[in-house]
Amino acid sequence: MARRGASVTLIERGRVGCESSWAGAGILSVLPPWDYDKGVIDLARYSETLYADWVASLKETSGIDCEYRRSGMLMLTADDDERDDIRARDWFAASCAESERVAARAIVPQLAVEREAWWLPSAAQVRPPRLLKALLVALSRMDVKVIENTEVLGFCQSGSRIVSLRCGEGELGGGQFVVCAGAWSQRLLGEHALALDIQPVRGQMLLFNCALNTLGPMLLEDDFYLVPRADGHILAGSTVENVGFDKSTTAAAREELMAHAHALLPSLNKKNLAAQWAGLRPAAPGNIPAIARHPEIDNLFINSGHFRYGVTMAPGSARLLTAAALGLPAAIDTAPYRWPGGARAWKSS
Ligand SMILES: Cc1cc2nc3c(=O)[nH]c(=O)nc-3n(C[C@H](O)[C@H](O)[C@H](O)COP(=O)(O)OP(=O)(O)OC[C@H]3O[C@@H](n4cnc5c(N)ncnc54)[C@H](O)[C@@H]3O)c2cc1C
């Protein structure tokens, strides 16, 4: 929006970029894609077309390399799951995605298990903490005002418009208001949420400190993944837990993730475990985010509910939000991302 000339203020309860977006693995794919609706796939694909240019321009502006790279992904398949195998074959064939059926050890020889796998050579990743740092620098270069340590508590409404935000330090006025408060979006909106359904889902992650080239591509087995960074670190994640707004880490998750990581790559063990953390994903039904104008309040917008793929969908979501708020044409069909509920019929924005 700032790039389009809008005067933007970002109000953050804590420090910018320290919640779910920081905690994410940075895998830039929907996995497995055949489990998701068109709305998820379309937004992920649209974002994929924007990513390389976006991170390049962020690097130019901020000097920070977000480590966007096509490290590839090896998707291990269950030996006995013929149904899933057929779905995968059909999907890859129909989508023309670069893919190859391989023996997993042909790609990752150090793998402890001998299995069949799908090799996706162009699957990409980014390093979220670096992406967020780069974004913050870019915001300052675009004169976006960032107000940290300020919680938005509610909205002051007059007729069908919001006139200001209620914050700890008083009220803040503006022309248009965008809620992008992740897992807290629905709670912040209160009665204005209407039928929006965004719940916190905790994800825990481990970080291993490894020698360079311990693992080349990303590795996926069911819901579990290993993501190698360029400097040798390897991420192992992640849990999917319905525990409300509890962001603590647990010994049980550490043991579970450690056991899975060790079973695939025996060099991952307690000795090289460097960190454990948790984040709260903003979970919306079907993993379809809401990116739209409020059905009843003309100047209230949302960009939230990206659940497991908020990093993947980031650049496309920002474009769709900008289109909605500034009345510009959108590059993809925005109907799946409308704000659910409300008495007034939803109109395309
Ligand atoms: C363990 C884990 C692994 C993940 N891996 C991936 C992955 O590999 N690929 C991928 O695409 N996605 C991944 N995700 C999902 C992705 O991180 C999220 O979908 C995305 O980060 C959500 O971004 P967001 O900006 O909506 O929320 P957040 O990043 O949580 O940001 C919301 C912000 O709003 C602020 N806020 C909340 N309430 C208020 C208030 N009242 N006033 C002011 N500020 C407020 C918060 O402090 C926070 O900074 C992962 C998530 C987790 C937890």
Image (spheres, rainbow, N blue to C red):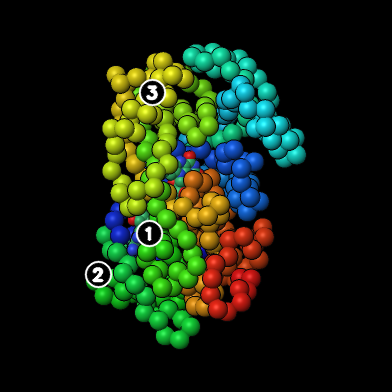
Image location (x, y in percent) of residue 229 = 44, 29
Q: Is residue 26 visible?
A: yes
Image location (x, y in percent) of residue 151 = 29, 64
Residue that badge 2 annotates: 168
Q: Is residue 178 above or below residue 121?
A: below
For residue 259, which numbered disc appears in the image?
A: 3
Q: In percent of the image, x 48 and y 31: which residue is there?
A: 225
Other residues around mark 1 within 10 Å, as few (<14) / some (14–19) / many (≥20): some
Q: In percent of the image, x 40 and y 81: which residue is there?
A: 157
Other residues around mark 2 within 10 Å, as few (<14) / some (14–19) / many (≥20): few
Q: Is mark 1 within 8 Å of ligand 1?
A: yes
Image location (x, y in percent) of residue 224 = 47, 31
Name the mark nearer the viewer: 1 or 3. 3
Q: Secondary structure at mark 1?
A: helix
Q: Say which amino acid is labelled 3.
A: Ala
Foreground: 69 or 254? Answer: 254
Q: Quadrant of the C terminus?
A: bottom right
